[in-house]
């Protein structure tokens, strides 16, 4: 990571001119390639800074100090959010972070892009002032800072290809243990980033295994059907925690490099995140999967309404 950061910094005149020419030749006057590469440079140096801080914590005997690592996570999220705004042009609005307080709460969040974890960390840690615990896919360990600091915090890196499902669910359930008033456990219940192709495939497969559930979730237009096992594990391990449904718009289509370029070509705009809190007394103890499906259908409709409002506002501005 350090080598990557140094090479990108040392060669900036080359890629700066090269990406401008590349964009202009293609008629992309908003210079999407330049802006994306500029974000990559900033990201690399933020990673180096985070890894350096983690190393210094270890040398100072604070390698297991949760307080300093949560503070580092807040700095990481805030810095990358500022970088995202300055380079890519996406401005994130967290509409009602006060809904998250007080803890303990379990957050069931939608998943649409590579930026979800970053925006979620910023919303939970910086905007709401809580200490988030995450269920993250093991592939994210490829990010050095997320790997090192993420393992020092009470997160769980899920092996989605594991044959030991009970062991993975036990790991998820551990995040719900001993949640305090400043703690929140977060899971992306769709299990992967949503797009139309995945939604069609999942619903088609579900129609063979559980036709009643497939019919119930066929109305989804923006989200994927929720995978209930992890959510149920958290609900069981944290019986006193309220549930928060987390929705967002503005990150759809940012699940691939090509999608990012298309979004930048069209204009990055504003991304919004909001929360709906459900008291634990309103969470049923039976037919929980049906309850979760209904909440997901409500979130899908809310996402559609937000997208329609955003489209109307953009049309009015034009």
Image (tube, rainbow, N blue to C red):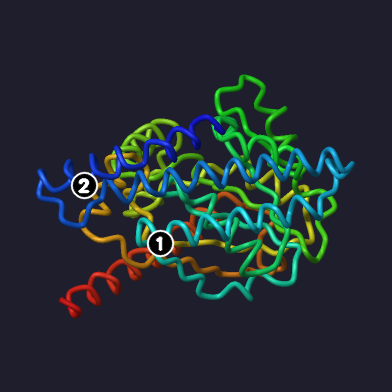
How would you rate the neighbour count of disc 1 (Cα within 10 Å): few for under 14, some for 14-19, many for 20 or more? some
In the image shown, does 141 or 252 lie closer to the viewer?
141
Q: Nearer the viewer, mark 2 or mark 1?
A: 2
In the image shown, does 133 or 72 lie closer to the viewer?
72
Residue shown at the point (63%, 33%) measured from the top left: 158
Q: What residue sits right under mark 1 in the picture? A: 86
The mark found on residue 20 in the picture is: 2
User: In the orientation shown, which residue stands out farthest toward the bottom?
Assistant: 316
In the image shown, does 264 or 298 lie closer to the viewer?
264
Residue shown at the point (36%, 61%) measured from the top left: 250
* In the displayed structure image, the side of residue 46 where residue 240 appears, left or right: right
How would you rate the neighbour count of disc 2 (Cα within 10 Å): few for under 14, some for 14-19, many for 20 or more? some
Measure the alpha-carbon separation of dots 2 and 1: 17 Å
Residue shown at the point (61%, 69%) measured from the top left: 127
Q: Secondary structure at mark 2?
A: helix
User: In the orientation shown, which residue stands out farthest toward the top?
Assistant: 163
Q: Position of residue 313 (x, y in %)?
A: 25, 77
- In the picture, which quadrant includes the N terminus? top right
- In the picture, which quadrant includes the C terminus? bottom left
Q: Position of residue 255 (x, y in %)?
A: 37, 43
């Amino acid at each position: 990571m350090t080598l990557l950061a140094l090479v990108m910094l040392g060669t900036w005149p080359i890629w700066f001119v090269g990406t401008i020419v590349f964009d202009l030749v293609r008629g992309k006057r908003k210079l999407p390639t330049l802006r994306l590469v500029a974000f990559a440079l900033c990201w690399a140096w933020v990673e180096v800074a985070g890894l350096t801080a983690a190393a210094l914590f270890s040398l100072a005997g604070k390698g297991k100090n949760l307080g300093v690592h949560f503070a580092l996570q807040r700095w990481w999220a805030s810095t990358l959010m500022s970088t995202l705004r300055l380079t890519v042009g996406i401005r994130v609005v967290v509409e009602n972070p006060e809904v998250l307080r007080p803890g303990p709460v379990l957050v069931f969040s939608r998943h649409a892009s590579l930026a979800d974890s970053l925006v979620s960390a910023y919303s939970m840690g910086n905007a709401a002032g809580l200490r988030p615990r995450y269920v993250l896919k093991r592939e994210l360990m490829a990010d050095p800072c997320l790997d090192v600091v993420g393992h020092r915090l009470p997160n769980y890196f899920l092996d989605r290809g594991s044959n030991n499902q009970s062991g993975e669910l036990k790991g998820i359930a551990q995040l719900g243990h001993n949640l305090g008033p400043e703690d929140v456990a977060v899971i992306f219940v769709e299990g992967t980033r949503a797009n139309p192709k995945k939604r069609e495939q999942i619903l088609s497969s579900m129609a063979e295994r559980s036709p009643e559930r497939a019919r119930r979730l066929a109305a989804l237009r923006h989200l994927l059907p929720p995978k209930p096992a992890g959510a149920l594990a958290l609900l069981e391990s944290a019986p006193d925690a309220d549930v928060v449904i987390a929705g967002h718009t503005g990150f759809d289509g940012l699940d691939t490099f090509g999608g990012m370029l298309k979004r930048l070509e069209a204009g990055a705009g504003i991304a919004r995140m909001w929360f709906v809190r459900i008291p634990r007394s309103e969470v049923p103890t039976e037919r929980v999967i049906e309850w979760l499906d209904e909440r997901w259908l409500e979130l899908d409709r809310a996402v559609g309404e937000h997208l329609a409002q955003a489209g109307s506002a953009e049309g009015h501005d034009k």
